[in-house]
Amino acid sequence: MADPLSWGVLGALVATEGIKFLYGQATEVLKRWRERKAGRKGEAEAPIPVPADAPLEGTLEPPTVDFGATERLHDEIKALRSVLGDYADGLADPDPADQDLASAADGLRRALELVYGQRITFRGEDREPSGPTVIGRAEADTVAGELTGVHARLVRSGRVEATAIARNVSPEGKVTGGEFDTIG
């Protein structure tokens, strides 16, 4: 679970720029979702640009939209984006004591992390840097064949968490947390 945003840690400039970043990314995700619904798959599936001056710790790979996650989170992304609008447009400054604003920004960040499959970390935060994250967890009561948490053929950067749990494994069964071919 990600640590919630803390304006005191981030500082006013990074908090303001972070809100602008989240707002802009959410706008692009919602546009891509609409384009896909309208049948314009090529436009919808293109990577979303990340501004060169984004206040991020680490590097986001050019994000593409997970439309299944966007479908589930669409209403939440739209509502949280709306809460951040005046701050993103420069009509209001984030108040370090405003926990509702911090929660809205963190909620939008978490939603975007699910849509992008990447961690979004701002400069000054005490959490892992931005970038791809693969989390796989497989559970079964009984395994007679194979059970694998993550099977990846190529992971060039980012972080991978792989877990496989089984209560009973038959003599021919195999349980593996992760199998990787080429990580870095």
Image: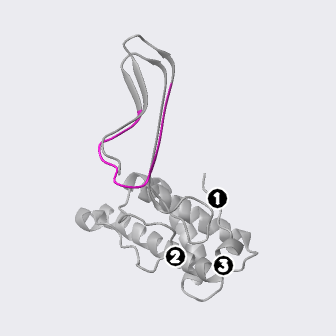
Q: Is residue 165 visible?
A: yes
Tally of numbered tags: 3
Location of residue 16 with respect to 132 vertically, above or below: below
- Chain part drawn in magenta: 149-165
Which residue bears the numbered disc 2? 55
- Residue count near mark 1 (Cα–Cα under 10 Å), binned few <14, some 14–19, many ≥20: few
Identify the element where label 2 is drawn. loop
Location of residue 11 with respect to 37 vertically, above or below: below
In which quadrant of the rendered view does residue 45 lie? bottom left
In which quadrant of the rendered view does residue 171 lie? top left
The amino acid type of the residue labelled 3 equals Gly
**Residue 132 picture location, percent across and down:** 42, 56
**Residue 162 picture location, percent across and down:** 46, 39
The amino acid type of the residue labelled 1 equals Asp
The residue shown at (38%, 55%) is: 157
- For the residues labelled 1 and 2, the Cα–Cα distance comes to 17 Å
* Left or right of 81, for residue 144: left
The residue shown at (35%, 51%) is: 184
The amino acid type of the residue labelled 2 equals Pro
- Is residue 126 one of those drawn in magenta? no
Which residue bears the numbered disc 1? 3
Identify the element where label 1 is drawn. loop
Task: In this rendered view, identify the residue nearer to me: 179 or 29.
Answer: 179
Which residue bears the numbered disc 3? 11
Asked whether the beta carbons under mark 3 and mark 2 sit within 8 Å of each other, the answer is no
The residue shown at (73%, 74%) is: 98
